[in-house]
Amino acid sequence: MSSAPSRTTVVPLTRVRMAKDYIDRHYTEEIDLTEVAAEAGYSRYHFLRGFSAAYGETPGRYLSRRRIERARELLGAANLTVTEVCHLVGFSSVGTFSARFKAVVGISPSQYRRRSGRPAPVPGCYVLMWANGFATGPGTATQEKPAPRPRR
């Protein structure tokens, strides 16, 4: 008895992991499902089913949860406003960020910061400089100094 080939194919776990790693590396950016699926080499709908089967959640939910995890770290470790944290972790709307944060954590970002109760060891300005890249233009410490001009 020959069996007919299955109409549903399975997305190999290695491809799903590659796409998950891509999400982890680019979580602060605006990521599109088609872009992540292309990273795995599949159509968006086929990839969505494979990712959900492998991790028990959609790529969008995973991305949102990853951003919230990072926001929790920043709220407890850096002296940043909720708005700054929102944008640093990849959300474009403070309202959406706060609603998702509360849905995952159970309290608002501001309440989370107050309940952490520990002083922020990292000044917010350093976190913002790190997140935005260090400047190398004129007047910055990382720019090379020009060679001295010869005297006449």
Image (cartoon, grey):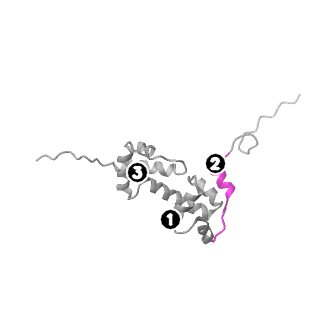
Q: Which stretch is magenta?
A: 117-134
* Number of the label disc, if any, that sits on residue 69: none
> In the image as oriented, which residue stretches furthest toward the right?
152
Q: How many marks?
A: 3
The spot of residue 74 in percent (x, y) is 60, 60
Between discs 1 and 3, the one toward the N terminus: 3
- Residue carrying label 3: 17
Q: Quadrant of residue 143?
A: top right
Cα separation between marks 2 and 1: 28 Å
Sequence-wise, the earlier of marks 2 and 1 is 1
Left or right: residue 141 compared with residue 13: right
**At x 60% / y 72%, what residue is drawn?**
115
Q: Is residue 67 above or below residue 116?
A: above
Q: Secondary structure at mark 1?
A: helix
> Which of the two residues, 73 or 149, is positioned nearer the viewer here?
73
Question: Where does label 2 land, which residue?
Answer: 132
Residue annotated with mark 1: 103
- Residue 5, quarter of the rendered image: top left
- For marks 3 and 2 on the same chain, the one whose residue lies earlier in the sequence: 3
Neighbourhood count class around disc 1 (C-alpha, 10 Å): few under 14, some 14–19, many 20 upward = few
SS assignment at label 3: helix
The front one of 130 and 6 is 6
Q: Is residue 140 toward the left or the right of residue 104 in the image? A: right
For badge 1, the amino acid type reads: Ala
Q: CA distance from mark 1 to mark 3?
A: 26 Å
Mark 2 residue element: helix
Q: Is residue 73 above or below residue 37?
A: below
Magenta run includes residue 126: yes
Q: Position of residue 13 (x, y in %)?
A: 35, 51
The three-letter amino acid code for the residue at tag 3 is Arg
